[in-house]
Amino acid sequence: KQCTLELPVEKTIEKKTGTPDSSTKFSFRLTPKSSNYPMPQNTSASVDKKTGAMTVSRLGAGHVSFGTFTFGLDDAGKTYTYTVEELVGSNRYYSYDSRKYTVTVAVTMEKNVIQIRTNYVCSDNSTVSKIHFVNTYNNTPPTPNIPQTGQRWLPLYISAGVGLALFLLGWFLRRKKA
């Protein structure tokens, strides 16, 4: 007797300016609270052998799955806790979602049938129905930080004063030689 659970992630991209590149890779990590917790089966995911964390990736917006968990009789009466987060990518035009989700999986046995109850809690302590990350795309170049008129005049006055002093010193020394 076994029961399965799929753990999907939804990715949305909000566009401020420009057109997002659909080949941008987004990565998500599933970390078990304990390294001996069951993990989903997914041959395309990478797994950190030390922590047991699993990473899946997708190109652009849409859905990706960590894979399918399989729970059996040995899991009945147990509760497993996982953290899901988006990893920060290298595309400078995106703001990456910093939210983390705590996923709780409770496995019970009811009338000789394995039951699974999942609970998703976002890092803002809200209970949600799905794992959803949102990135903002903005390819507007940053505005250079140019001082406004009237700012930073002191260095100009100092430079002019030093220049005038050197000019007068040279003029004085030249007159003294003559």
Image (cartoon, rainbow, N blue to C red):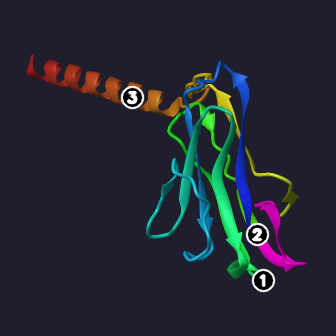
Residue 53 higher or lower than 73, as above or below: above
Q: Main secondary structure of the magenta part?
A: strand
Q: Which is more N-terminal, label 2 or label 3? A: 2
Q: SS class of the residue under badge 1? A: loop
Q: Nearer the viewer, residue 121 or 30?
A: 30
Give the numbered dot on residue 159.
Answer: 3
Checking the image for residue 104, the label placed there is 2
The quarter in which the N terminus is drawn is bottom right
CA distance for labels 3 and 2: 66 Å
Task: Say which residue appears at 69% left-offset and 21% top-offset.
Answer: 17
Q: Quadrant of the C terminus?
A: top left
Residue depicted at x 56% and y 53% = 42
Sequence order check, earlier mark of 1 and 3: 1
- 84 lies above or below 174: below
Q: Nearer the viewer, residue 92 or 65?
A: 65
Judge whether residue 169 is colored magenta.
no
Viewer-nearest residue: 160 or 50? 50
Three-letter amino acid code of the residue under disc 2? Thr
